[in-house]
Amino acid sequence: MSKDSHRMGGRNSEARATTPEFGGASQGGDGTTELKTGTTTVGLTAAEGVVLAADMRASAGNMVASKNARKILQIHSSAALTISGSVSAAQSLVESLRAEVRLYETRRDTTMSLNALANVTANRLRSGNFQIVQPVLGGVDDEGAHVYSIGPGGSVMEETYAASGSGSPFALGVLEGEYDEEASVDDARTTAARAVQSATERDTASGNGLSLATITEEGVDIDSYDRVENAL
């Protein structure tokens, strides 16, 4: 399991290993629950957009709870979120962000920028209600393509590429060697798929196919593959 984990007290007990998670949970020596984000998600910018990728396995402790988990969800006309952590918290976060985007754009009669969306997402995590979720946000706005790595405590870091989950060290190894900021969207899709493939080879909490999203100024297109190889 990944070293990238955080601790949760009583009100977040839903993250016990008996519930489906994008990762598993174990009991700490001090009685708190330690969540390990057992999944692999990546995001990277390209010359004309953003590519997000994720495996499709959800686990409940040592059991594979689902082989068809959707870990990339659209939250904006030209942005999507990858999620790792508690399934219920992630679903709630996504619905909350979709509502925030609608409210923002209705009140201001303008499209929400990616910077504003990243900060709204971080504020939701800082509230404490969603601190068992570690998202990667990717999208396109008037200023170009953006990828944000958002920590479970609400930190925000804009990157050219990012990864989350227990498979992220393996995915980052591929991204470090193959990422090209001038690459086409098609080439970026191949790099993202290879990054997730590398993680599924070594991380037992990642696997069961691939979700691959292409985001441009025209919108969000999400594809699913039974095998990572089918996307290469």
Image (cartoon, helix red, strand yellow):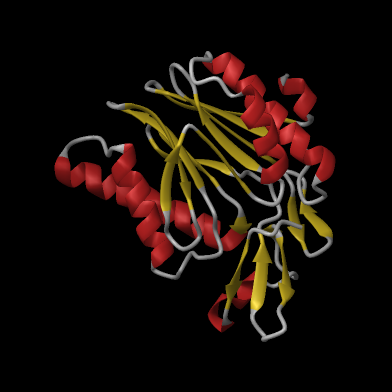
Quarter of the image for residue 190 reads: top right
Left or right relative to 56: residue 133: left
Does any portion of residue 49 appear in the rendered image? yes
Relative image position of residue 97 (x, y in whole percent):
39, 51
Q: Residue at x 39, y 53 (%)?
A: 121
Does any portion of residue 210 appear in the rendered image? no
Q: Quadrant of the N terminus?
A: bottom right
Relative image position of residue 120 (x, y in whole percent):
33, 53
Q: Residue at x 53, y 17 (%)?
A: 185
Left or right relative to 184: residue 58: right
Relative vertical location of residue 103 with respect to residue 144 in this rendering, above or below: below
Q: Quadrant of the C terminus?
A: top right
Quarter of the image for residue 21 reads: bottom right
Relative image position of residue 225 (x, y in whole percent):
72, 29
Q: Could you say which is closer to the camera, residue 155 or residue 73?
A: 155
Q: Residue furthest front?
A: 177
Q: How many marks?
A: 0
Q: Residue furthest bottom?
A: 30
Q: Residue furthest left?
A: 108
Q: Residue at x 25, y 49 (%)?
A: 103
Relative vertical location of residue 185 with respect to residue 223 in this rendering, above or below: above
Relative vertical location of residue 63 with respect to residue 187 in this rendering, above or below: below
Q: Residue at x 58, y 75 (%)?
A: 8
